[in-house]
Amino acid sequence: MSNSSASILLQNLIQLSKPLRESLRKTPYYPPESNADVSIKSFLISLLPDLSISESDVRTKIKDFALCCAALASAPNATTEHLSWIPNSLSLSAVSAFEEFAKLYCDDSMHANCLMKVDGLELDLSGVTESGKRLVVDLMPDILTMLKGSVKESAIDASDESDGVSAASARAPVAYAILAAYQFRWFVAQVDAPYIGKLCPLVIPCALTALDHWSPEVKGQGMISFIYLAKNVNAAEVGGYADVILDACCQNIASDDEIWHYVVEMSMLLLNLTQRSNPRSSWYEKLTNEMLNHLERQPRNKQRRISWLKHCEVLFNGLGLVLLAHFRRLFPLFFKWMHADDDETVTLVLERVITVVRLTWIRNSPYIERLVDELVSLYKDAALKVAREHIRSLILQTLNLIRLCKRPEFDATWFKYKDDPNLTALMEVCC
């Protein structure tokens, strides 16, 4: 970067930072009681450049400016009290400032190349028209290293048996790790396919570090980042990280309720991405059993069962006929959940039962008679439910599917209901 170029970028950086600094200063801020000695507001202000910086510091200040914008831009979707104080207007201003600076940065002749080398990786950005994405890609090697370090500062040292949450928190306030996790998630989300796949060697180690942290808030942002990756990269781009990632998924199945929906979605997507062609993979077995263990221990936990039922379709489709090996654990849960108080659980479990029957034709299964009995019982109970029409439609689909694949067993069970006056409408369709 030439001296004149650096000088122009620096002046623009200072100019764009002024309104952000003023807005930050005017925004009321009360540190959470759990981290009363940490001021995220002061930290963010310190990231913005002022007139005292020199041109030799411009690269560092660009990174700091980007980190401040990332934190402010993350606030609208944040659930942490460390960012909840940031108003939407300030978040929007940060996004605008970042985009405006990115245009100036990318217009500079030094950054106009279509081919960009990032940490030894050559990316063809000829199809990228958004200057913000170009700037993010250019900064990622340095910034992700910094963010990874911030997360590790308050992490538990697995090699030290005496290390724990208290000791880790004493070394560095967890607030900074939480902030870094949100910044990391924002940076990752700015780069889409196919470019994000090329950056996996940078992104995955940082995401794994977040998953290894003891704080659910840090873990959650790492999980969301992995969910984004799973939807935007291919198995080849994940490469040799597959086993490490899936092991991290297994280790995190025991996560708190507040992030369990993230770990379930993340695990399902990554399992499907990396093991899709191998339903007999040991990872399918490990992750399926680990999730079922937790569901069996808390079958009445509405939040967990709904999260799992929403995302397990991917798992079922990946397993295919191998699902038969899990029937003895799946169907007892299905039978309990069919009679849950909430319509959402009932609807979801019926949809998943249809998937299981469709994929396996429930061959060699002892559950056919019980399944028909439970569906008939639910059909009657559905009269009192708000979603009764939809529920009864799903029951009918399931019964017809069972009849197609197991006609003799179905007829033998169905016969005992032939004179039930409450099933007249059902009889007309199923018989």
Image (cartoon, grey):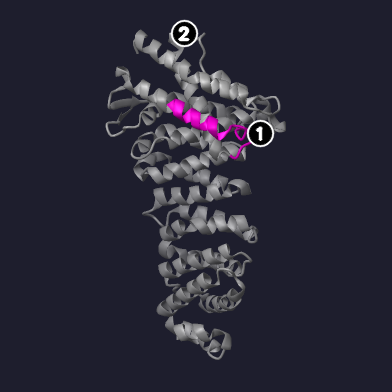
- On residue 54, the disc is 2
Residue 258 lies left or right of residue 51; in this view the side is right
Q: Residue at coordinates 52% horizontally, 21% vertically from top-left?
A: 19
Task: Indicate the quadrant where residue 198 lies.
Answer: top left
Please give the residue where the numbered disc 1 appears in the rendered image.
Answer: 161
Image quarter hosting the C terminus: bottom left
Residue 129 image offset from top left, x and y in percent = 31, 32
Number of the label disc, if any, that sits on residue 258: none
Residue 68 in the image: x percent, y percent?
52, 25
Q: CA distance from mark 1 to mark 2?
A: 46 Å
Q: Which tag is nearer the camera, tag 1 or tag 2? A: 2
The answer to if 83 sits in the magenta stretch is yes
Q: Residue at x 58, y 24 (%)?
A: 24
Query: Label 2 sits on what residue type?
Result: Ser
Residue 250 location in percent, x, y? 53, 48
Q: Farthest residue toward the bottom?
A: 419
Q: Secondary structure at mark 2?
A: loop
Q: Is residue 353 visible?
A: yes
Locate the N terminus by quadrant.
Answer: top left
Residue nearer the viewer, 87 or 60: 87
Seen from the viewer's position, the closer of residues 179 and 332 is 179
Q: Is residue 152 magenta?
A: no
Assess disc 2: are there few (<14), some (14-19) or many (≥20) residues with their C-alpha within 10 Å of its C-alpha: few
- Specify the segment rendered in magenta: 79-98
Q: Amino acid at mark 1?
A: Glu
| Residue 364 in sight in this render | no
Q: Name the side, left or right, on which 154 lies relative to 362.
A: right
Asked which secondary structure carries label 1, the reply is loop
